[in-house]
Image: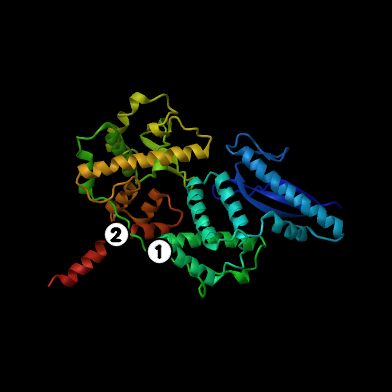
Amino acid sequence: MASSVKVTLRKKPNAQGLYPLAIRITKDRKTSYLYTGQFVKLKDWDPTERIVRKSHPNSARLNHLLLAKLSEANKVLLELESTQNDISSIQIKKEISAPLYKTTFKEMSDNFLQEMKVNGKLTRYSSDKVRVEHLMRFAENNSLTFKEIDEAFLRRFMSYLRSNKKLSQRSIVNNLVVIRTIYNRAIKQGVVERKYYPFGADKIRIKFPETEKVGLTIEEIREIEGLDNLSKPENHARNVWLFSFYLAGIRVGDVLQIRWSDIYDDRLHYRMNKNNKLLSLKLPEKLLPILKQYEEGKRGDMDFIFPEMKKANMDSYEDVYAKTNTATKKLNRYLKSIAKKAKIEKLLTMHIARHSFGNIAGDKISIQMLQKLYRHSSITTTINYQANFMHKDTDEALEKVMNF
């Protein structure tokens, strides 16, 4: 029976409800799948034409990527059929996977970054792109293979980041995490054998250093709330910051995309951009005066509460990311002047709203409830995050020893 390779959608959704796109390899009625790393909603897939529908914001780019992978797979299949008569779908998959997913670190990393860009993960794409560039500049070799990235190479790279790039230990670890992720993909796709893996207990160990998260106190937040000598842009920055803080530290990217239609039954209902999770929160009384300030500019229920996204192309990940980035820098600039007026010496940024909620929550709220508010997938993440702000037990223990 003739062999065939086709692009298909596998009906096994991930945790976000998205479905993986794969190359289906069929030989003698036996099938194997080679995953492309791309995921789409079921409604965005055309099963007849085997393409991503135009309803997907990046349909053209995705279809181009799928076509390129399918073309490469067909090329390898034709070569195999012309030289071998007896070959299984599993063997075909193995032969196709190497050229399909490339062999050098640069080619693999380019594919990895492209997938993140296509899937709209632009924040991670931007940061990981810089980290990949660090490695390529250090290696000075665009043909760098995975076998060359051994323990000794990585130790030299770490020294380079520390001495030449002046990066912190946390930033160095973040660079290693990207390399490890791409290396694991290479192993999974048959590009390199696991025996060459440079990470592990007896090799390069990745351990995140403890980081200090500083939040504002109740007194400092009251100072911000009570300021009456603010300019119009400063007042807006304060409103956005307090909106985030009052609702358990919602991330600025989510705050700016909240619409009037997301508020009903005296609650905010929204989906987090970071992990696509739904959250419903009761509106605190303190939030109502802030909302009232923006009612005059309301252009229907589907309009955004805050103005930053009113002119954004919401079908373009790139435009949303760019406008969010620009808005965050602008807000942080005005928050800096607000901190000066409130006589707060701590660095006041949009992200500090989340830390401030954690700091004030301290031991008052159970870890399980904080996990729900933060929408963390693992309670371990909540415990580690909240450990920065829970000092009651240690303070009391120290007091007992010193009180003599």
Question: With respect to residue 115, does 43 lie above or below?
Answer: above
Residue at the spot 40% in from the left edge and 63% down from the top edge: 169
Question: With respect to residue 228, does 138 lie above or below?
Answer: below
State the count of labels: 2
Helix, strand or loop under label 1: helix
Locate residue 247 relative to residue 42 in the image: left or right.
left
For this rendering, which residue is in front, 9 or 267? Answer: 9
Query: Is residue 186 visible to us here?
Result: yes
Locate residue 131 relative to residue 385 in the image: left or right.
right
Nearer mark to the viewer, of 2 and 1: 1
Q: Amino acid at mark 2?
A: Met
Residue at the spot 25% in from the left edge and 42% down from the top edge: 337
Locate residue 269 relative to residue 387 in the image: left or right.
right
Query: Residue 273, labelled with which disc?
Result: none
Q: Which residue is mark 2?
A: 390
Cα–Cα gap, marks 2 and 1: 24 Å
For this rendering, which residue is in front, 358 or 84? Answer: 84
| Quadrant that contains the C terminus | bottom left
For this rendering, which residue is in front, 119 or 218? Answer: 119
Residue extending farthest front: 140
Task: Give coordinates of residue 231: x percent, y percent.
Answer: 25, 33
Q: Which residue is mark 1?
A: 169
Task: Give coordinates of residue 309: x percent, y percent.
Answer: 43, 33
Question: With respect to residue 69, does 404 lie above or below?
Answer: below
Question: With respect to residue 373, does 312 lie above or below?
Answer: above
Task: Give coordinates of residue 223: x percent, y percent.
Answer: 20, 43
First along the sequence among labels 2 and 1? 1
Q: Amino acid at mark 1?
A: Gln
